[in-house]
Image: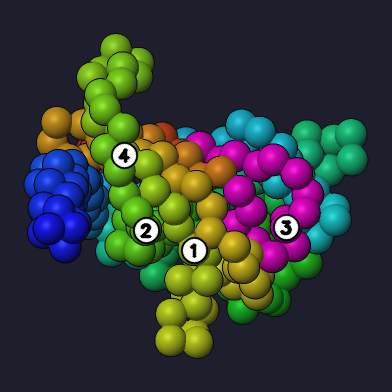
Amino acid sequence: MSRLYRWATILLICLVLSPALSGVVRAQDDAQAQIDATAAAMLALKSFHFDLETTAGTTTFQDAFELKSVTGDVVRPSSFRAEVQVKLAIISLTLEVVSINGNTWVKNPIGGGGDAFIQVTGGDSDVQLPPTLLLNPDELVSEALTYLDDPQIAGTEELDGQQLTAVTGTFDPSKLVGGGTPIAELGTFTPASQPLDVKAWIDDQNRLVRIDFSGPLFAFEEGSGRLVRSITFSDFDADVTITQPA
């Protein structure tokens, strides 16, 4: 009789938990489906505008300058232009960067050359730039959407007057070194060893409107305190032309 009671108890527990477990699985499936749809929608774009900002902590490179923000446009397949706000000691500078098919130019930030651009491709220049991963976040976002772990739909949230679907998850920066070969946009920087938290806001056309990365993206940032980078996207498929500097 006790054995029958035990089996009846187990069956009852299974019946009670089964709907809840099924609900969790469905929720995870829905979140993954949303992330997959967003990855496809972003990949299908011909162009977009972006604004990247460090909203908590600081982004400092080569122990020399702090990256404040990046504003720019991406034109597929392999062109971008950006205005990069940096701070060097007490001096604030704006770097204008243009990149076409892997060739990158930057306007002389301290003048003396008028509107002349310096080609920095291949390290033949003394001008040091932040990693292309942040100057052109296209590849970073693509990798994050592709390899987002434990995606969860966090509900609907309003952002700048838009009702957007919020999705959370984690991203392991080591995915930027696929098959042992770092993506070109990573440059000489080593990715962080621990996953970081991600929150994405998605519109009704499955396009990414904003994504926040909370945590170190690069190894040298580990242990430096709270760090949050926010990237917003707009002007999807706008008619943008990026030309090589004269």
Earlier residue among tags 3 and 4? 4
Q: Which residue is drawn at 12% across and 58% down?
A: 1
Q: Which of 187 and 47 is in front in this view?
A: 187
Mark 3 Cα shell of 10 Å, populated few (<14), some (14-19), many (≥20): some
Q: How far apart in space, not on screen, are marks 3 and 4 (Cα)?
A: 25 Å
Query: Over which residues does the magenta segment extend?
Result: 215-230
Q: Mark 4 points at which residue?
A: 167
Q: Main SS type for the magenta part?
A: loop
* Residue 132 x/y as whole percent: 54, 61
Residue 158 visible in the current orientation: yes
Q: Name the residue under label 1.
A: 172
Q: Mark 2 points at which residue?
A: 149
Mark 2 Cα shell of 10 Å, populated few (<14), some (14-19), many (≥20): some
Q: In which quarter of the image is residue 217?
A: bottom right
* Residue 66 x/y as whole percent: 76, 44
Q: Is residue 143 above or below residue 55?
A: below
Q: Mark 3 points at which residue?
A: 222
Q: How far apart in space, not on screen, are marks 2 and 3 (Cα)?
A: 20 Å
| Image-based side of 170 in relation to 228, left or right | left
* Secondary element type, mark 4: strand
Q: Does the magenta stretch include residue 226?
A: yes
Earlier residue among tags 2 and 3? 2
* Residue type indicated by callout 3: Glu
